[in-house]
Image (cartoon, grey):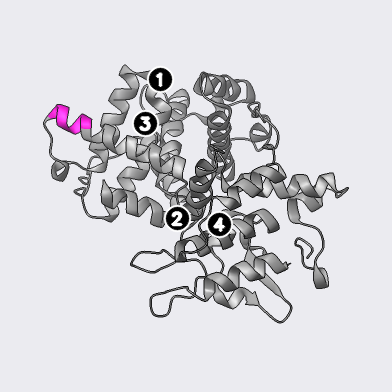
């Protein structure tokens, strides 16, 4: 479990997701103990067989059980699962079709284990609808009505986000089938879109709440100086936790002064560096201790002195929020706080999302 937690942090999973995956690992351990099976004797197929059996007995567990796929990836990467046996029996047409689609998703689209596991679930439920008694596939059975009736069944009882992902997987399967000339292109366009439930933007923090969050930091320690700089950056610039974690020494331009962050989709933004952000960074960099060659700005405070990951940045805000009596304050809440300030000051929604114009066409928060 300790190695799993370290792996989850290294992979950049959010704190809430980390807890869910640890619970999934504990559930897997309980299954193996109940069956009297050692982990060394288990392969991936066995794990997913346990998941399928539990899903049949307890349909309400389905969403939670999907977390096991990430645990399986950890066990495979650390050599704890034995290789799955090679099945030499000839595949039925439906099985061969599913295997080809999963191979396309993995090789051509670069999808990970979790998405492939969910794709397998959709394929195993959809392909029997176009399969005859001999195992042959009859794609002419597929039309918009049939597809949407299937979609309604597979999303029943699930959350809006799960329903959206299953609809996306179904569209992906149909798009792939159309590319192979098995169905008409227009069928994909007729797939229904499950209603996305949006609660609206999270409410920003008040000025007094932001002050309480900052006052909770002990700035006399190395960790405190680091955490102060993180919180000031998030609250002042409205950057994402991943952008803070990815900040490197080479991204700091003290002559402008400005800093460069890499946002979603690899988009590079050059942001003005407000005075308070610069002061917080200087205070931390003066005491920053790093392993040889480490260029990340924000580092772990205990060996190894390597880059602090996105989950670690989020934990900083969550920890000081609780200390300040602001339970449930995450890093993204500070981003929405900055957005609220922009809108209140008469800015546009685009400025609230991207930041108001900075120097030389960059986007950021004005000094």
Percent x, y of residue 167: 57, 32
Query: Which residue is located at x 58 percent, y 28 percent?
Result: 160
Horizontal relation, residue 78 to residue 296: left or right: left
Answer above or below: position of 322 versus 286.
Answer: above
Residue 143: which disc? none
**In which quadrant will I find the N terminus?**
top left
Crowding near pointer 4: few (<14 within 10 Å), some, many (20+)?
A: many
- Residue 205 lies in quadrant: top right
- Could you tell me which residue is drawn at 14 percent across and 42 percent down? 41
Task: Indicate whether residue 74 is drawn in magenta.
Answer: no
Give the CA separation, mark 4 to mark 1: 33 Å
Of mark 1 and mark 3, the one earlier in the sequence is 1
Instruction: Point out the stretch of residues depicted in magenta.
Output: 30-35
Query: Within 10 Å of the Cα at label 3, are there few (<14), some (14-19), or many (20+) other Cα atoms?
Result: many
Pointer 1: what residue? 60
Camera-nearest label, 1 or 2: 1
Q: Mark 4 or mark 1: which comes first in sequence?
A: 1
Q: Position of residue 145 (x, y in %)?
A: 62, 20
Q: Which residue is disc 3 drawn over?
A: 65
Secondary structure of the residue carrying tag 3 is: helix
Q: Name the residue under label 2.
A: 107
Marks 3, 4: nearer the viewer? 4
Q: Do the residues labelled 4 and 1 touch (CB within 8 Å)?
A: no
Q: What element carries label 2?
A: helix
Q: Nearer the viewer, mark 4 or mark 1?
A: 4
Give whichever of discs 1 and 2 has the lower sequence position. 1
Marks 3 and 2, the one that precedes in the sequence: 3
- The residue carrying mark 4 is 242
Q: Are marks 1 and 3 in contact (CB under 8 Å)?
A: no
Give the spatial CA distance, label 1 vs label 3. Answer: 10 Å
Distance from the alpha carbon under mark 3 to that under mark 4:
27 Å
């Amino acid at each position: 479990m300790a190695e799993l937690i370290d792996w989850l942090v290294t992979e950049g999973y959010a704190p809430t997701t980390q807890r869910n995956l640890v619970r999934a690992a504990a559930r897997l351990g309980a299954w193996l103990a109940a069956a009297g099976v050692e982990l060394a004797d288990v392969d991936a197929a066995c794990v997913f067989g346990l998941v399928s059996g539990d899903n049949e007995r307890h349909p309400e567990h389905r969403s939670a059980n999907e977390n096991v796929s990430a645990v399986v990836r950890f066990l495979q990467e650390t050599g704890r699962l034995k290789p799955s046996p090679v099945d030499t029996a000839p595949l039925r047409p439906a099985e061969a079709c599913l295997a080809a689609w999963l191979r396309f998703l993995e090789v051509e689209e670069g999808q990970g284990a979790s998405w492939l596991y969910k794709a397998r679930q959709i394929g195993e439920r959809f392909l029997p609808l176009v399969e005859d008694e001999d195992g042959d596939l009859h794609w002419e059975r597929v039309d918009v009505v049939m597809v949407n009736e299937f979609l309604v069944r597979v999303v029943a009882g699930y959350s809006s986000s799960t329903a959206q992902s299953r609809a996306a997987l179904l569209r992906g399967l149909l798009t792939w089938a159309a590319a192979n000339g098995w169905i008409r292109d227009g069928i994909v366009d007729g797939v229904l879109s499950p209603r996305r439930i949006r609660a609206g933007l999270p409410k920003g923090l008040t000025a007094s709440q932001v002050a309480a969050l900052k006052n909770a930091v002990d700035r006399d320690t190395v960790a405190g100086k680091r955490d102060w700089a993180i919180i000031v950056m998030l609250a002042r610039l409205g950057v994402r936790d991943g952008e803070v974690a990815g900040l490197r020494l080479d991204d700091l331009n003290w002559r402008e002064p400005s800093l460069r962050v890499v946002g979603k989709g690899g988009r590079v933004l050059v942001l003005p560096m407000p005075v308070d952000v610069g002061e917080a960074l200087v205070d931390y960099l003066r005491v920053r201790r790093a392993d040889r060659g480490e260029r990340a700005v924000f580092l772990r405070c205990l060996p190894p002195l390597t880059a602090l990951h996105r989950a670690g940045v989020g934990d900083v805000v969550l920890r000081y929020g609780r200390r300040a009596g602001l339970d449930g304050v995450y890093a993204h809440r500070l981003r929405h706080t900055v957005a609220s300030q922009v809108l209140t000051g008469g800015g546009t929604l685009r400025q609230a999302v991207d930041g108001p114009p900075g120097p030389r066409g960059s986007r950021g928060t004005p000094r």
